[in-house]
Each structure stands twice: as structure tokens, then as C-alpha cells.
Image (cartoon, rainbow, N blue to C red):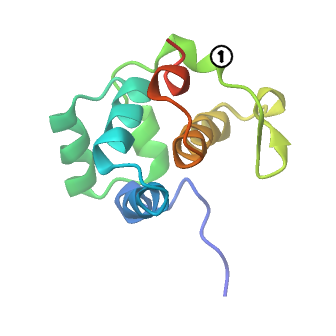
Amino acid sequence: MARRSINEMSFSSVFPLYIEKVERKGRTKDEVIEIITWLTGYSQEQLKEQLEKNVNFETFFKEAPKMNPLRTLIKGRICGVKIEEIEDPFMKEVRYLDKLIDELAKGKAMDKILRR
């Protein structure tokens, strides 16, 4: 069975997995939402609409109102790959989000996660 590409996967199918991951570590859904809205520029209402429309990851990032310029400060490894070495712009956006969720799950303070 072929694995679906991340850009074809629906964002709404992965969103609950982000929530589960951080809740196991004592963090909250609201913090996940804060991270996603910070990164993408979606309002909470717009994020809810994207989840209800069941858009794929590619569409989710393409339709993002304003990607946060501070996201380029996100450094480090995700899945063994340095974020700053990822050349595919779409994949870099996905990995930025993955890294932020990982930082939240690891207990990092929100101010540091959001590069304040």
C-alpha cells in the first residue's frame, strides 16, 4: 500500500494528533492553536474553517493569510534533518510546524517557542 504524500494528507486528520501529542505531556489544545495561528496568520475562526473544509496540507499552507516572518528563526533538527537545510519551501513550512509542536511537547515556554 502506497503512503500518501504529506501535501495530500488533510490537515484536519493530523491536527488531532498534534493535540494528543502535547496533551500527553501536559500541554493544551489552546497552545497548539496559538502556535498554528502565530505561524500561519490564520485567526482562530479561519483555522476552524480550514479544519471543517478538510483541506490538505498544501492548501492549508498556500491559503495561510501571512506566514510569520520570525519562523526563519526556527532552527534545529526534525526527523533527523536540519530545518535550515530543507530546500523545498512547502516541506520547510511543514517542518517548522512540526518543530514548534515538538518544542511544545518537550515543555518549552511559549515565549521561546514563538520566538519572542
Q: Residue at x 28, y 42 (%)?
A: 30
Name the amino acid type tagged 1: Leu
Q: Residue at x 73, y 26 (%)?
A: 75
**87 lies left or right of 58:** right
Front-most of 104 and 59? 104
The image quarter containing residue 95 is top right
Q: Is residue 111 above or below residue 15?
A: above
Residue 48, image x and y in percent?
20, 46
Residue 20, image x and y in percent?
42, 64
Q: Residue at x 45, y 21 (%)?
A: 67
**28 lies left or right of 81:** left
Q: Residue 63: tell me if it is visible.
A: no
Q: Quadrant of the N terminus?
A: bottom right
Q: Is residue 14 above or below residue 80?
A: below
What residue did someone put label 1 on? 73
Q: Residue at x 62, y 62 (%)?
A: 5
Residue 61, image x and y in percent?
45, 36
Q: Residue 60: tell me if it is visible.
A: yes
Label 1: state its secondary structure: helix
Q: Residues within 10 Å of mark 1 (few under 14, many from 20)?
A: few
The image quarter containing residue 18 is bottom left
Q: Is residue 22 above or below residue 83?
A: below
